[in-house]
Image (tube, grey):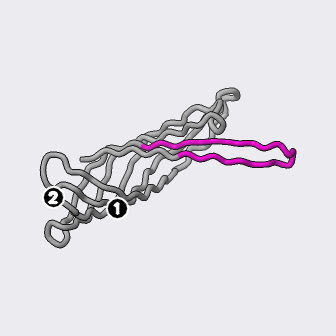
Amino acid sequence: MEGGFGYALSDVKTNPTTGTSVSVNAKVWLADLSLVYAFPLRGDVASFFVKAGPTLIGHTGKDAWDGVSGRTDVGGVGGVGMRFKVAPMVLIRIDAEDHIFAAKFTEDASGGETNSKLQNDLVLSAGLSIAAGGSR
């Protein structure tokens, strides 16, 4: 079992036909808790793994989301990856995850709602893992 958290930010600057510069920022955060099943490769040096579990996705950002509710959604996450042992308790990791959820937003002032739409947030990552409580 493992947990994960991701945070992505963006800032878009536009210069509409009025000649006034406009800056809009939006952020997305992801949190998940997954069950992981590893398939050893080449003895104890590398492994391929699959993972799945629930995920929580939130959309924030003052400019992009002012006056909008329904910005946090629950969904599912599935992923695959590889781990390569570089020391007894240290591994290099490469992951690909798909966070799947149904997004539906409500404008607070009018009460108008968007149609529920299936979303896929793909996350590619690489990094170091340090095993706690024994070798992996």
Q: Is residue 12 magenta?
A: yes
Quadrant, the C terminus? bottom left
Query: Does residue 16 appear to the left or right of 67 in the view shown?
Result: right
Q: Is residue 69 magenta?
A: no
Spatial CA distance of label 1 from label 2 is 18 Å
Q: Residue at (14%, 46%) from the top-left corner?
A: 133
- Examine the rendered structure and indicate whether residue 114 appears above or below residue 108: below
Magenta part, dominant SS: strand
Q: Residue at (34%, 61%) from the top-left corner?
A: 94
Disc 2, SS: loop
Residue 119 x, y percent position in the rendering: 52, 51
Rendered image: mark on residue 49: none
Identify residue for label 2. 88
Identify residue for label 1. 94
Specify which label sits upstream in the sequence, 1 or 2. Answer: 2
* Amino acid type, residue under disc 2 in the picture: Pro
* Amino acid type, residue under disc 1 in the picture: Ile
Q: Residue at (26%, 49%) from the top-left corner?
A: 35
Disc 1, SS: strand
Residue 2 x, y percent position in the rendering: 27, 47
Residue 35 can be seen, yes or no? yes
